[in-house]
Amino acid sequence: MESDSMKRTDFPANLEYQSGFGNHLSSEAIAGALPQGQNSPLVCPLGLYAEQISGTSFTAPRKLNLRSWLYRIKPSVTHEPFKPRVPSHERLVSEFNQSNSSANPTQLRWKPVEIPESPTDFIDGLHTVCGAGSSYLRHGYAIHMYTANKSMDNCAFCNADGDFLIVPQKGRLWITTECGKLQVCPGEIVVLPQGFRFTVNLPDGPSRGYIAEIFGTHFQLPDLGPIGANGLAAPRDFLVPTAWYEESSCPGYTIVQKYGGELFTAKQDFSPFNVVAWHGNYVPFKYDLSKFCPYNTVLFDHSDPSINTVLTAPTDKLGVALLDFVIFPPRWLVAENTFRPPYYHRNCMSEFMGLIYGGYEAKADGFLPGGASLHSCMTPHGPDTKTYEATIALGNEAGPRRIADTMAFMFESCLIPRVCPWALESPFMDHDYYQCWIGLRSHFIRETTNGQRRDVHKGHNETVTGGHGE
Ligand SMILES: [Fe+2]
């Protein structure tokens, strides 16, 4: 017979999910557990407690309002008082200021962070890289990475600060939530909304990934504009768990609450995954990035990366995102007479990039799966020298080409990130990143198509006979 802890780490082989984005869903682990016709009966079916979890203010407009009703064996409140966790976590930030992070306009790049060999679970393996704003003021974001090798044991994590969008790069995640279980593989993403309790098991051992945390808003599907009613990420490809519960006694079970970037713990003697039925639209969900339907140019020029937006977290300003999650998936390149890799640019938005697998079209080398780059507000960036030279050497006869076996992504924000000291001092910081552009040479030829060089200073033309000096 399995022990209680075995049951908690066990994962069904064929998990069932519900489908859709933003839907009002319902799920019962036992038929009849969900109250009918009302949310809070005097006594709920099966003697369960009714508990609402709100993801937006009660009075948020209906189209934005998010909440779910959970019907559970014991309510969440049944625990001892929260205390600061011992040991404290020194590398989490949720309010970015001069005391915990710094301004840095340089192009930054990190090699893949090594996964520790000492036992490290998802919570201890989390560290903030950069971010802006404040979880207290409900406006801002944090970008974290995690490196872990061990499942969480007899504890659940609860993030009171914001929503996590997790991008696993190595190792599957077996995530148990109050709404049920999700298996998330590299190539998939999962969103765990603010306030839900969850635990992360690592069936593959050493694991690594990226996390965008957003404060004060939630992810939406982007508007499609002239693309029409279909394309990019389809609502039906977002998968939500089905109700799953355990009733076992769990002496010393710990809730680890991230609150204002600090960790607090509270003890209880039962599993928080005791929700027998639920309904609502505030739910965890996952998405397989290979289902993304890319749209792009079919004649000339390189489209802006916003064309590949999977999810967007809006601000109050129309079209200005607190955080866009954008991917660079396998696709065909067909543009004629066009520099096909990303153009050189400076952006008022700030761009954090990661690579899940394969290579990235704008960097011939140095940007590795599990690595990251940060190009902040108005910091110039673009293809490295090798990519530029290789692209123009191909000329206009390149023909259609399929970019295959790759999945890069970007977290893009209108808020300018401050960078945490441990990220700047990391042994995985690529101090030679700038070198990838230093070799870009001038291809300038002051020459018209008929072989005449135009000298704008002298105001007359002269025949070119020599090189153009680099
Ligand atoms: Fe960019």
Image (cartoon, rainbow, N blue to C red):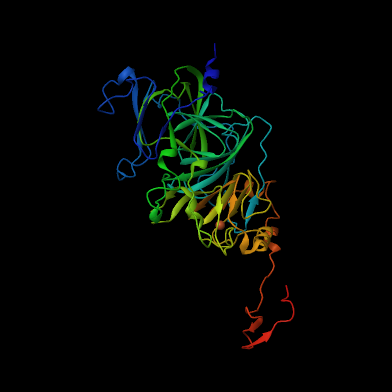
Residue furthest out toward the left: 37
Q: Is residue 65 left or right of residue 256?
A: left
Tell me which residue sits at (29%, 24%) in the image.
Answer: 35
Query: In this orientation, does residue 46 appear?
Result: yes
Tell me which residue sits at (64%, 80%) in the image.
Answer: 450
The spot of residue 465 in percent (x, y) is: 73, 81
Q: Name the image quarter holding residue 379.
A: bottom right
Quadrant (top left/top right/bottom left/bottom right) for the N terminus: top right
Quadrant of the displayed image that contains ligand 1: bottom right
Tell me which residue sits at (42%, 43%) in the image.
Answer: 234
Query: In this orientation, does residue 415 appear?
Result: no
The spot of residue 324 in percent (x, y) is: 48, 50
The spot of residue 227 in percent (x, y) is: 41, 53
Q: Is residue 87 left or right of residue 270?
A: right
Q: Is residue 154 above or below residue 184?
A: above
Frontmost residue, 188 versus 205: 188
Q: Is residue 193 left or right of residue 103?
A: left
Residue furthest out toward the top: 1
Frontmost residue, 18 versus 271: 18
Q: Is residue 154 above or below residue 389?
A: above
Frontmost residue, 446 versus 161: 446
Q: Name the image quarter holding residue 119.
A: top right
Frontmost residue, 318 versus 360: 360
The spot of residue 425 in percent (x, y) is: 67, 48
Q: Is residue 257 above or below residue 410?
A: above
Q: How many marks?
A: 0
Tell me which residue sits at (67%, 86%) in the image.
Answer: 462
Quadrant (top left/top right/bottom left/bottom right) for the C terminus: bottom right
